[in-house]
Image (spheres, rainbow, N blue to C red):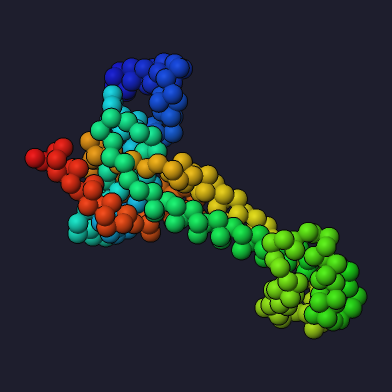
Amino acid sequence: MDNRINKAVSIYKQLYNTDNKKFKFLPNWLETTSYWFNMEHNNNINKKYKKFSRGSIIYLDFGINIGHEFSGRHFGIVLNKNDSPYNSLVTVVPLSSKNKKHYLPLQNIVFKTSLSILNKTVDNIEFDLDVINHVIFTVIEIINKNNLQNTLEQNTIDYLDDFAIKTRFPTEREVINKGKNIVESFNLYNDPKNFSALFNYLLIDVNDRKSKVNNLREVINKYKKFDKNTFACTQNVVTISKLRILKINAEDPSGRMKLDFDSMKLVDNEIKNKLIN
């Protein structure tokens, strides 16, 4: 083995053990880089990539770079005019939530709108979870009966008091209808022999919805950093591989979000003034 590789590994280990926060991400970056090098060597990299519109906001890993080059995971604005699924590269302007010299302040409409949608989605799922939990409770109560739909309605008012959700949902009718829809969608309530299957299905559904809520909250916490201030780092325009594009998790809407026309015009003018004129 080339001694230079051993020397580089030794230096990486030393840097990782320093107090420099940037180098704490070295293991992740080196593992990622070696993974893609291996995929490339074995011709296992896809030939087609996601196509992005100009102004799209994506989340990507800039890696660990030298000096003031942008490093780490950040959002960025796509600059490509005519992107293609066969184009493996994307040119971006990184975004930051911190104000620094030469950074361009932007209105944070995109993140505000996304946060509003994400929070509303969480509220809707939590409403469904409240109702599903009630259905589960009802199924347990009437496991030997055969009229889940009527019992569901009879017990709903008590349920509303017990779970104190009147402040969120003004009428018990909304809960009753939601519960009926859930039960009817499974088409199981007519036969008491199916209550056990319904119960198990509901438990799985609850876990799936809770997992989705956890993912949504993770995305929301990340987006909140940009809720008040968003800055375009126009001096750090970079062209990188689309393989570096990430998702926070499955609920992350990045890639589908797009900067508004006025903000994109500001970015274009700033790039022209700093890098072209």
In the shown orientation, is residue 178 left or right of residue 269?
A: right
* Residue 100 at x, y percent in the picture: 32, 31
Quadrant location, the C terminus: top left
Asked if 194 appears above or below 230 in the picture, the reply is below
Quadrant location, the N terminus: top left
Which residue is depicted at the point 46% across and 41% down?
225
In the shown orientation, is residue 173 left or right of residue 105?
A: right
In the shown orientation, is residue 84 left or right of residue 141?
A: left
Q: On the image, which quarter does residue 95 sit in? A: top left
Q: On the image, which quarter does residue 104 sit in? A: top left
Which residue is depicted at the point 31% across and 57% down?
260
Which residue is depicted at the point 39% across and 53% down?
109
Q: Residue furthest left?
A: 277
How many numbered circles does the render carry?
Answer: 0
Q: On the image, which quarter does residue 29 sit in? A: top left
Residue 265 shows in the view: yes
* Residue 62 at x, y percent in the picture: 33, 38
Q: Residue furthest right?
A: 144
* Residue 88 at x, y percent in the picture: 25, 51
The front one of 92 and 192 is 92
Residue 40 shows in the view: no
The front one of 190 and 138 is 138
* Residue 173 at x, y percent in the picture: 74, 76
